[in-house]
Image: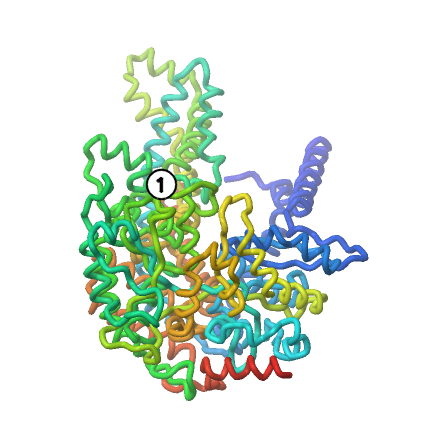
Amino acid sequence: MLKESKYPYFLVLPSLIFLILLTIYPLFYALYYSFHYWVIGSPVIFIGLDNYYFVLTNPLFINSLIITLKFSGIVVAIQLLLGLAIALGVSGIKRGQGLICALLIMPMSVAPVIAGIIFRYLYFKGTGVVHYFLSLLGIPLPPEGILGNPDTAFWGLVVTDVWEWTPFISLIILASLLSVPSDIVEAARVDGASSVKIFRHITLPLIKPTLFIAAMLRFMQAYNTFDIVYVETGGGPGTTTQTLSHYLFYEGLVYYRLGYASALTLIIFLIAIVVINIYLKFTIFRGGE
Amino acid sequence: MQKKAIVAIIAVVVIIIAGVAAWLLMAPPTPITPTEKVTIRVLALQDPFWFPLNDLIPEFEEKYGIDVVFEGVSYYEVRLRAVSAFLAKSPDIDVVVVDQMWVAEYADAGWLLPLDDLIKRDREEVKPDDFIPEIVHALSEWRGKIWTLPVAAYGQLVMYRKDVFDELGLRHPPKSFKEDYEWWTWDKYLEYVKTIHGKTINGVTFYGTVEVGQQPAPIVHKWTQYLIGMGGKWFERFPEAPWNFEVKIHEKGKDALKLFLELYKYSPPESIEYFWFDAGVRFGKGDIGILLWWTPYCYLIKQPEYMVPGVSAVVGKYDVALPPHPEGWKVGDHPIMSIGGWSLGINPYSKHKEEAWKFIKWATSFETQKKMGLLKGDWGEYQFSDFVRYSLYKDPELLEVYPWLPTQLEAWKVGNGKISRPMIPLYFTLEGILGRYLNDAMAGRITVDEAFEGILKEFNTALKQNFYLPEYAGPMFDDTIEYVADHLKKLAKG
């Protein structure tokens, strides 16, 4: 249990005020309009729970939810594994660790929308570098191009996201690895434990909380993926890459169906809260730790 | 204890300073510094008209003593910024560029100043009867009033490789309805595409055509040309009154989609991902036989990339012709060409409405539009033939630079922008539905029948939820091109 102290609450107070103004107020505003028919330019009419019904029975919403959960789960899993591998490799390097960390930060410093544009051109058939090298390796590629084919467009986005955010995970894990007490590791080595056993029984349990937090943070970001979808596929082909955020963008800021979009926002928000709470219950807060 | 308190206070102060600094540093739009001179902000996007007009802004500023902040942003940002300003009743934007489908929405919401009285007052300068009625009908008029003035009008014409046609012995398509045009049907168009496809000429293996598949807007723009080209429509009756929004898009829509999918077989497969300019760039690369697309591409295909100086592979090798039509169609039957484009409107919350009106009159005048057409800017080429006035189509200097102008002028007569893409506030929702299903069909995930089953179901749901069905309850107007032509003449007479 944490020791009772006034200071942590005092320190987070400014951020809390900021959050209340920028989050709670708009949330209640959205809640109010979620019970209304409101399309830009038209009168606002109270319609009760109709918007929620329209959202939950809309196949587009179900499709976007599945795509989003699938995308988030896959990218987080890949990034955790790759990130861990990279962190383990870097932690074993004696010289040049700082330079490698600086290089690792580079993909993260590119704005996601720019990364999306770059990858769109890399995937282009005929002129794209990725397409070119994959075809040199004899890998069969769809004639429509990677982003033009319903089976490969999703994976094109996965690769973009993994490229951009694996360094983020690896740096978090690296920091945790470097804080593992070296004397425990040394003691285990002296006792004859192999590297695999040391990792499995000492390192991994110690960095597990960090892994859980990194996964949760990345999941929250991936759940909200919009930018790379917008610039790379537009949610297509068809709706094969339409995430919840992309769907919400169109409903709220293109079609200006604000009542419907308000209900959609709240449903997306509730789903995120439920998923994260379940995750926290079975991971970080498991056993009251 | 005391040390902890000091650390806590310092931390709080740092957080507050950081928050305030972030707020101050957030980049606002370019501020308009109050001076004695009036400064107006024009919100536009970087479509081709923006570039030459931007180069001419100093002339306007010198002539009228009004400073102009002429912004060119992305498509969705124009709409987002404009709607945000309107909702906030902000005077931040004085003149806003309006896409064809936004006029109804903005006008119904009270976000545009009606221009009829201003046009009438300044009729000697505006010359309203010089505007092409089909263009004003499509881009500027709603419920009988004129809300904007068109600045760049787009039709859809055929661009074809005349050298390839000659090599294969194909008859050149008609440039005028005064010549023999009856043979230029959709069947013939498809036949030509198939004939060209796969042929190797001068070492280049050709695709018959190039399609555009990116959803939602680009693919809908392409497909609705086929829809109207086959005599199709979205609703039972619109824009003529009484409006009846019973969905009819499937009647000719299925044929239009079948044609579209057939043409896609003779296109580069990756064109399923193409945005508007990708198709033009591809034609410019020199391996496409025929392109049916928006009229700005008549000049854009001369460049290697959008607004990039240089010469494409098709300069001197292509020509422009009328769009195809259904078998047995004659001029005066239903329209066969989609009309789109951009117009300029006044923000009703602007504090400089008179200055904004001066800008609109200037930007849409014969003199300015001619200069735009004859300007060679950084992009290195003549870059604007999207003219909105009759007089521009007769100017000898412009005809020399843009030899397709007579074809373009004739094509307006067979165009109707409100049939190909109905200008109703719900348009974007319906476009989104169409875009998804069309793209899905293009990707081979659904059949034509499945696509239209989905389109009809979602269209009907959206129309019912938004009170267009079962019966439209809002005010109607008998919105015809004849009305607009007559209205412009009346405004010209005063």
When asked about the image quadrant of residue B493, the answer is bottom right
Q: How is the image coloured?
A: rainbow
Q: Determine the chain carrying the residue at label 1.
A: A
Residue lying furthest top: A190
When asked about the image quadrant of residue B458, the answer is bottom left
Residue occupying the point 27% across, 76% down: B329
Residue A158: x and y in percent read 33, 42
Residue toward you, A213 or B67: B67
Would you say residue A288 is visible in this rendering? no
Q: Secondary structure at mark 1?
A: helix
Classed neighbour count for the residue bearing mark 1: other residues with Cα under 10 Å, few (<14), some (14–19), many (≥20): many
Residue lying furthest bottom: B242
Would you say residue B93 is visible in this rendering? yes
Residue occupying the point 35% across, 24% down: A202
Residue B435: x and y in percent read 34, 62
Q: How many marks?
A: 1
Quadrant in which the C terminus of chain A is drawn: top left
Residue A94: x and y in percent read 43, 13
Residue denoted by label 1 = A76
Residue toward you, B326 or B227: B326
Residue occupying the point 48% across, 37% down: A110
Identity of the amino acid at label 1?
Answer: Val
Residue toward you, A7 or B367: B367
Residue occupying the point 75% across, 59% down: B38
Is the residue B377 above or below the residue B463 in the image? above
Is the residue B358 above or below the residue A50 in the image? above
Residue B63: x and y in percent read 72, 58
